[in-house]
Amino acid sequence: MPASSESIVRLPAGVDLHARPAARFVRTAIAFNATVEVFAAERRADAKSLLAVLALGARRGTALRLSAEGPDADLALAALVACVAGLVE
């Protein structure tokens, strides 16, 4: 059975998840051998799809729930939490 993990992170106060930050987030997710999903409010997106992440419409201060499954699940979540924490306008 593949490993799965979950984490919650909040977008920094001055950052919306628009094109540049979303692209950085997706590039981070793609680097891992894991299926990664991101949830914002009632919306769900494949963290490896730029269009899906943009469609979340996540704005500053929004809590994101990250869920990963696969061999690199823990590493992917750690990297994505660090990525979101490091996003700056």
Image (cartoon, rainbow, N blue to C red):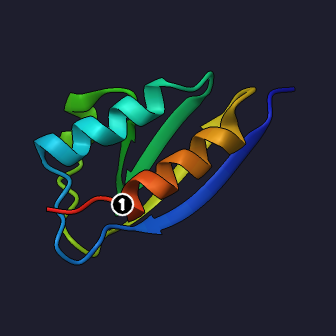
Q: Residue at x 87, y 26 (%)?
A: 1
The total number of labels drawn is 1
Q: Percent from the top left, x then y, of residue 75?
A: 66, 41
Q: Residues within 10 Å of mark 1 (few under 14, many from 20)?
A: few
Q: Quadrant of the C terminus?
A: bottom left
- Is residue 62 shown left or right of residue 83? left
Q: Is residue 45 above or below residue 80?
A: above
| Rendered image quadrant of residue 4 | top right
- Residue 79 seen by the camera: yes
Residue 31, relative to residue 29: is it above or below? above
10 vs 31: above or below: below
Inspect the image, locate mark 1, and give the three-letter code of the amino acid beneath it. Answer: Gly
In the figure, 73 relative to 57: above or below?
above
Q: Nearer the viewer, residue 54 or 25?
A: 25
Residue ID for mark 1:
86
Question: Where residue 27 sits in the image (x, y, percent)?
Answer: 36, 30
Residue under the point 15% across and 42% down: 20
The residue at the point 29 percent across, 39 percent down is 24
Look at the image and tell me whether residue 55 can be seen.
Answer: no
Position of residue 87 in the picture relative to residue 74 (left or right): left
Measured as percent of width and height from the top left, residue 29 is found at 46, 33
For the point 24% across and 30% down, the residue is: 50
Secondary structure under tag 1 reads loop
Q: Where does residue 28 sit, x and y in percent of width and height?
A: 43, 35
**In the orientation shown, which residue stands out farthest toward the right?**
1
